[in-house]
Amino acid sequence: MKRIFLLIVSLCMFSSVCMASPVYYYNYSNTSNYVYEPNTDKNYAQSVVDLVNRERLKAGVRPLILNPYLCSRSDIRANELATIFAHTRPDGSQFYTVLDRRKFHYMTAGENAAAGASSPQEVVDIWMNSSGHRQNILNPKFRYIGVGYAYVPNSQYNNYWIQIFSD
C-alpha cells in the first residue's frame, strides 16, 4: 500500500511539472523566419502517458513516471521531426544525444516517433499496433517517460509526436 501511495504522489509531482510546461509549435509566416509559440490549449503529454500506462497495466507492467527533463527533451525531438522524420537528429547524431548525461543519468533509452496523428488516442493506437513501438511502451526496464508534441503547419505531416523512455 505504501508503494502505491508513493507511486501516486510521484506521478502527481512529475505530471504537474510537465503539465505546466507548454507544448510548442512552429508558426511559419510568409518569410523563412518562424516564431516559437506555446500551444497552451492542449495537454497532450499527460493524455499520452495516461493511455500508455493503461496499456502497461493491462500487460502487468508498472506504470511509467512522467519526467520533466525527458518532457523538455521530447519537445525538442518532436520539433526536429518536422525537419527529418527519423530516429536521428538533424545534425545526423542519434536521438539519445538530446539527453545530457550530466543532467539526467540513465543506462538505457528508447524513442517512439510518429507523425500525422491528430490526438493522443490516435498516436497511442498507432504505436500499440507497431511491434517495435509496442515493445518500447511495454518494456519493463523503462521507468520514466517524456512526451513531446509539435504542431508544424504547412509541413509534411503537421503533427509530430515523440516518446523518450529511460530506466
Image: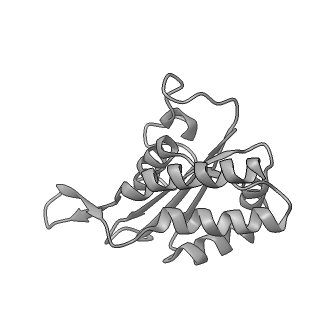
Residue 154 image-quadrant placement: bottom left
* Visual colour scheme: one colour
Q: Nearer the viewer, residue 78 or 68?
A: 68
Q: Position of residue 146 (x, y in %)?
A: 54, 50
Q: Is residue 60 left or right of residue 157?
A: right
Nearer to the camera, 102 or 58 = 58
Q: Which residue ends up furthest to the top in the rendered image?
A: 102
Closer to us: 113 or 144: 144
One can see residue 130 in this view: no
- For the point 64% across and 55% down, the residue is 8
Is residue 40 placed above or below 80 in the rendered structure? Answer: below
User: x%, y% of residue 22?
Assistant: 34, 58
**What's the residue at 57%, 64% (across, down)?**
114
Task: Decide: is 18 above or below 151.
Answer: above
Q: Residue furthest left?
A: 31
* Up/down of 79 relative to 29, above or below: above
Q: Can you say which quadrant of the picture contains the C terminus?
A: top right
Q: As displayed, is residue 134 above or below residue 73? A: below
